[in-house]
Image (cartoon, rainbow, N blue to C red):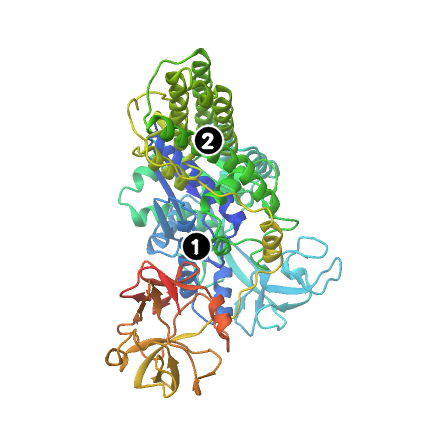
């Protein structure tokens, strides 16, 4: 059996992933990777953030930081969200790592030596004030077709016409607003026309052998029907992989060329054996998961680059492409923050496995789909909780109550044997669907098995049969316990936490896929206590959640946390439980009233570094004006200050948001600060000082006050 090399499209680093991003690549790939591991296949699941290019450079300019700082910030956000969704990457890296430069430049040298790199000059839009060539989206002006005043340089939002920035009337730089000029610049091109014959031959064989999805086949075939032409591989930017060719030292590689190489470089940065995966086509099958907008980069351009080197690269075997997931009656939008984003999911309190379930059950495989709150709640309740959740509870409760939780391999009646035979066939159908990467079909087959189990329980009536034939009733619920083991195995790629909870209730070790069709082997085994898998979702939640997440996603004013040092301390003259502290913030001193008496001794607080909410609106507390708040963690009555080590007085904590000028106490509470695993977090994202997580010493999990 060949090794399984699995990738999901590298998410671009300059924003927070939404549900469409998550189902479009990382979640789908995770399901297949988990399946392969359970099957015993040697598996490597690779992903990482795509960090170079115009969007990162301009986001950094907008936020007044370096591109690296932008990438550090959003890489951490992406990583935290995928961890919360239980995405089981073997490696999650970054395209800004040194290995990316090394491998991208080496592939370029190989292509150049093969005569596949050409040069050409053209007139491009240049901003003289900013001193840069402008990417298409950073030029705005009047549409030459409909006269819309704010058309972008790539497309007019009003009439939908595709545009070149040079065609805009009255153009202006989106960054500074001045009128750009045309300036000649030279770029390097990959001559895809010279690669058309070998690429087309490879495509025609791979698409059949790897059972490519229909949209991948038709999109790629369309490229060949139109004919391949040279594509630029360089850009006039500073943030990217530098071009190792005389005369191009001040340019970088275009992100379409550079980003897919990230799959290779991320593997190489993490594993010494990377070539046994990426240059081992006889032993390795490459499975790639993505949304439909990424198809040509993975079926034409990336394989074209690899074929052009003449080296034995592992090429795409199977490509799995989703259509778009929309939000209610509109589209998810990173630029307008429309829809449910990763951090929003964590705030709803709905278990992650229910999100995984609905996204996969609603996976847009053949046409665009929509995330609908009412549908989410209805389907999750009816198809999952009332089905598998109900079967788990009723089977295990009955087995514990009537048979002391003991599974027995007793003789089967004809009806019981027929049910087992049909269940084994259903499990085989799930296996076949997963081998073919038919993810939604596999999940539907799992739900069908759950429904069959509930019907079997009802038809066998063990509560009645037990009065006349105890062994037959015991055989029924024992068969159903085996079915639960099977369901927990085949459900694991989709809902890993749920499967693990079922294994705990069954009191079994994590099994492999091969155990799923087995209805023997647990004779005499005693299960654990039964638990309710999930509480049903309240249908009345739908309207409130729909309203909450429709339109622009609003983030409340953020606290400004700074390191302060207590330089003087006394008891409040009018309140026994309050301190009045003089706190230095480096460039100023503040009077801060703190309710820490009895929790933190004076001797410990005096001279100590503390975190101050520096933009809290001043308030009089028992007659003393407080110009901020000392931050503390609390759990079980224990109050703990944060360990700030060598952090300089006045230093600011990075919360992932720009702080507001001033906030009130209610807005501070809306920031949802907490302590998880001894780390200060905002919506599960670690808060950092000079790149390091802010930690406590005595509270592992608690609230922040």
Give 53 or 610, whichever is nearer the viewer.
Answer: 610
Compared with 334, 497 (above or below) is above
Q: Is residue 650 at all visible to an observer of this figure?
A: yes
Identify the residue under disc 2: 391
> Which mark is in front, 2 or 1?
2
Q: Are marks 2 and 1 in contact (CB under 8 Å)?
A: no
Give 698 or 265, whichever is nearer the viewer.
Answer: 698
Which residue in the rendered view is the most extreme toward the left?
A: 603
The residue drawn where x is 44% and y is 51% is: 258
Image quadrant in which the C terminus is located: bottom left
As helix, strand or loop, the secondary structure at mark 2 comes to: helix
The residue drawn where x is 36% and y is 81% is: 578
The answer to which of marks 2 and 1 sits earlier in the sequence is 1
Circle on res. 376: none
User: In the image, 539: left or right of 695?
Assistant: right
Give 41 or 206, whichever is nearer the viewer.
Answer: 41
As helix, strand or loop, the secondary structure at mark 1 comes to: helix
Identify the residue under disc 1: 78
């Amino acid at each position: 059996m060949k090794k399984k090399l699995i990738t999901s499209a590298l998410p671009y680093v300059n924003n927070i992933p939404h549900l469409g991003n998550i189902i479009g690549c990382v979640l789908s790939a995770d399901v297949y990777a988990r399946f392969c591991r359970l099957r015993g296949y040697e598996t490597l699941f690779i992903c990482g953030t795509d960090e170079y290019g115009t969007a990162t450079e301009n986001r950094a300019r907008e936020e007044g930081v370096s591109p690296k700082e932008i990438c550090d910030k959003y890489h951490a956000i992406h990583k935290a969200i995928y961890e919360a969704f239980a995405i089981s990457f073997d490696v999650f890296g970054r395209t800004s790592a040194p290995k990316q430069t090394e491998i991208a430049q080496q592939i370029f040298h190989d292509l150049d030596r093969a005569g596949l790199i050409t040069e050409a000059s053209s007139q491009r839009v240049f901003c003289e004030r900013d001193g840069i060539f402008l990417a298409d989206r950073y030029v705005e002006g009047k549409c030459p077709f409909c006269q819309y005043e704010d058309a972008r340089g790539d497309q007019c939002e009003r009439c939908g016409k595709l545009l070149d920035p040079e065609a805009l009337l009255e153009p202006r730089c989106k960054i500074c607003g001045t009128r750009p000029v045309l300036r000649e610049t030279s770029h390097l091109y990959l001559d895809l026309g010279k690669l058309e014959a070998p690429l087309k031959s490879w495509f025609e064989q791979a698409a059949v052998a790897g059972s490519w999805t229909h949209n991948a086949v038709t999109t790629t075939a369309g490229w060949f029907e139109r004919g391949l032409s040279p594509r630029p591989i360089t850009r006039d930017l500073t943030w990217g992989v530098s071009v190792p060719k005389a005369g191009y030292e001040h340019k970088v590689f275009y992100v379409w060329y550079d980003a897919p190489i990230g799959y290779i470089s991320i593997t190489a940065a993490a594993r010494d054996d990377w070539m046994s995966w990426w240059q081992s086509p006889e032993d390795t099958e490459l499975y790639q998961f993505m949304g439909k907008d990424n198809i040509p980069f993975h079926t034409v351009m990336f394989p074209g680059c690899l074929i052009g080197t003449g080296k034995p690269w592992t090429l795409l075997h199977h490509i799995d492409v989703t259509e778009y997931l929309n939000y209610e009656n509109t589209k998810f939008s990173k630029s307008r923050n429309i829809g449910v984003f990763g951090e929003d999911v964590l705030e709803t309190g709905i278990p992650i496995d229910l999100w995984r379930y609905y996204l996969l059950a609603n996976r847009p495989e053949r046409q665009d789909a929509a995330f609908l709150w009412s549908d989410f709640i209805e389907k999750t309740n009816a198809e999952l909780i009332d089905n598998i959740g109900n079967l788990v509870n009723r089977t295990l409760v009955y087995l514990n109550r009537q048979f002391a939780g003991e599974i027995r391999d007793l003789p089967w009646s004809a009806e019981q044997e027929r049910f087992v035979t049909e269940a084994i066939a259903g499990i085989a159908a799930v296996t076949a669907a997963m081998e073919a990467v038919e993810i939604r079909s596999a999940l539907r087959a799992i739900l069908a098995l759950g429904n069959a189990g509930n019907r079997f329980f009802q038809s066998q009536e063990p509560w009645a049969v037990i009065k006349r034939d105890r062994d037959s009733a015991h055989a029924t619920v024992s068969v159903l316990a085996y079915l639960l083991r099977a369901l927990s195995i085949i459900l694991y790629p989709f809902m890993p936490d749920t499967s693990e909870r079922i294994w705990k209730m069954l009191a079994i070790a994590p099994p492999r896929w091969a155990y799923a069709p087995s209805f023997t082997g647990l004779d005499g085994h005693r299960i654990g206590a039964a638990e309710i898998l999930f509480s049903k979702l309240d249908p009345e939640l739908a309207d409130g959640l729909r309203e909450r997440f429709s339109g622009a996603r609003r983030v409340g004013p953020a606290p400004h946390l700074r390191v302060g040092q207590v330089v003087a301390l006394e008891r409040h003259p009018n309140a026994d439980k309050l301190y009045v502290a003089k706190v230095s913030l480096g460039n100023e001193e503040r009077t801060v009233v703190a309710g820490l008496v009895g929790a933190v001794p004076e001797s410990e607080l005096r001279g100590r570094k503390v975190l101050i909410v520096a933009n809290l609106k001043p308030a009089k507390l028992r007659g003393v004006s407080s110009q901020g708040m000392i931050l503390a963690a609390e759990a079980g009555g224990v109050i703990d200050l944060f360990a700030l080590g060598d952090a300089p007085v006045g230093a600011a904590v990075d919360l992932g948001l720009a702080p507001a000028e001033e906030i009130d106490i209610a807005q501070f509470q809306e920031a949802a600060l907490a302590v998880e695993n001894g780390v200060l977090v905002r919506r599960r994202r670690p808060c950092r000082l000079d790149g390091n997580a802010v930690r406590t010493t005595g509270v592992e999990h608690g609230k922040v006050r």
